[in-house]
Image (tube, helix red, strand yellow):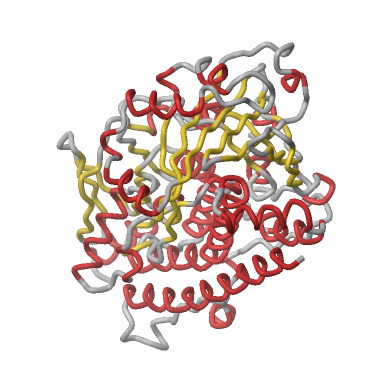
Amino acid sequence: MTAAQVTLQQQQSRRPGILIVGAGLGGLFLGIILEELGHPYHIFERATEVRPLGSTMALGPGILPVFEQLDLLKELEKFALPCHSVEIHNANMDLFGSIKFMERERSGYPNLLFERPDLYDLLLRRVPKDRISMGKKVLRTEEVSGRVYIHCADNTTYEGDILVGADGAYSGVRQSIYRELMKKGMLPKSDHEDFSVANISMVGVAEKQDPKKYPQLNDKQANFSTTLGHMKTRTVINIPDNRICWTINIQLSKEEAKAQHFRNSEWGPESNEKMIKEFEQLPCPWGGTMGEIIHATPKHLISKVFLEEKFFKTWYHGQTVLIGDACHKMLPGAGLGAVNAMQDAVVLANCISKMSDVSPQNITAAFGQYYKQRYRHALYSFTMSRFWTKMTYGQTWSERLLRQQVVNFTPEWVYFMLYFKTASYRPQIAWLPLAENRGTVRILPQDDIGSETKADMSKSRFKIKSKSKNKSRNKEQDQGYICEQVEKEKTKQTMESKKVDDHLLIV
């Protein structure tokens, strides 16, 4: 063996240096896991400062075991309340019905609701300050001689072995690798298509309110109350410290969605005020008007967003991989967007930890394992997110009919069937002691790529052919092969979802 070969072998046997673009919940969660593992990493965030935006978030059995592994669960419970159901009111403020969540006795964990900034602060405190750089807008990425580089707007450049795009729905990292794939004619047609937009939503958290005015604030559980009517939806939820999370939502036609999307860059304070005026005189389900709650929220902490969705086929290329909204932007109805971003982080870290060296081939193979393990579960969450968003936001004739059937005529076992897959799938950090299985739901076995033999891989759902059996197939073609297999899985999931919808319409 030559000196050059020895040097290369030494370099490849070290732990990979990981560049994480995006300091959102998924990026921070991955950083925390890598910190536990001892892998070198750094997080790059385009914003110059953290703004505590957002309203209600929910976490449940799909990710809480990992919080338990990381000693974060008790901290989370300090600013969260359990939620057992969603109450839906009609335009006349009459209670239309309730949608119940799976009981803790079955799932083993509560469904916790809280303010998003509180979770963000909790995760941010666990990442050493010297591991995050703010004001780093990534303009482009490239791979040269087994290294991956990011080039930022401030004329700085950083290099590593692995690049993780955790930079949201309009990911610059994704756009960079997609440009490369387009040049090679390897990007699936669907990955070119725009996001699907159906709603405009505004969210915020009102400052402390009087429990005498809103008795729901005295409860030790979260009251989730939604009112629908005239293409408008409004929601209020109590959280600890006498605060109220609120959401107002306008459903758009296809033509309105296209026009609003085009004017997205023009949104500002005037646009916010116009939307607020449409809701401020509407009654709140807890008494008073929505305006009384909205105007109790600092204006700079009110955010306006599109409720949009898209599920991408391509999650990785070469030494670059995507997590969270960068590869699967979900609607908020099921509260699964952040859960799936964190599950991505867990599974990706598990796959990286099992690499024998940091050669480009092994890195891409690890990404293939991550993709194989996560795709079908993320797709199911995506489908359920669309379904429950129709249930809690939808106001078309067909969506009202669906809600009528689900709320008033659906037996409990159907609810259990819908929740089962999300409650039974609980990926955990492979190198930490696993959290104890609780409840009565049968938990899916923990994926362990370290024990997967070549024979096992040949039987897996998304098979990656080894070099020895197909030497002509390079890593890009392997990605294409996996895409072919997951397309079949996507068709199967769509058929399963249709069966559920059809059942709900006839029960």
Q: Is residue 411 left or right of residue 54?
A: right
Q: Residue furthest left?
A: 155
Count the labels in the image: 0
Is the residue 172 above or below the residue 289 in the image? below
Coordinates of residue 396 in the picture (x, y in percent):
54, 53
Where residue 321 appears, as percent x and y from the top left, is: 38, 57
Q: Residue at x 34, y 43 (%)?
A: 21
Residue positioned most to the bottom? 469
- Residue 123, image x and y in percent? 53, 32
Residue at 70% from the left image edge and 53% from the top image edge: 404
Which is more toward the observer, 400 or 47?
Answer: 400
Could you tell me if residue 275 is visible in this image?
yes
- Which quadrant is the N terminus positioned in? bottom left
Above or below residue 28? Residue 173 is: below
**Horizontal side of residue 228 vs 417, given as left or right:** left
Q: Is residue 15 visible?
A: no
Quarter of the image that includes the C terminus: bottom right
Residue at x-position 45% and y-position 52%: 329
Identify which residue is drawn at 27% across, 40% down: 263
250 relative to 449, above or below: above
Q: Is residue 303 above or below residue 311?
A: above
Name the residue nearer the viewer: 398 or 438.
398
Splitting the image into 4 quarters, where does residue 84 fall? top right
Q: Position of residue 438 (x, y in %)?
A: 80, 49
In the displayed structure image, the side of residue 211 where residue 302 appears, left or right: left
In this picture, residue 67 sits left or right of residue 164: right
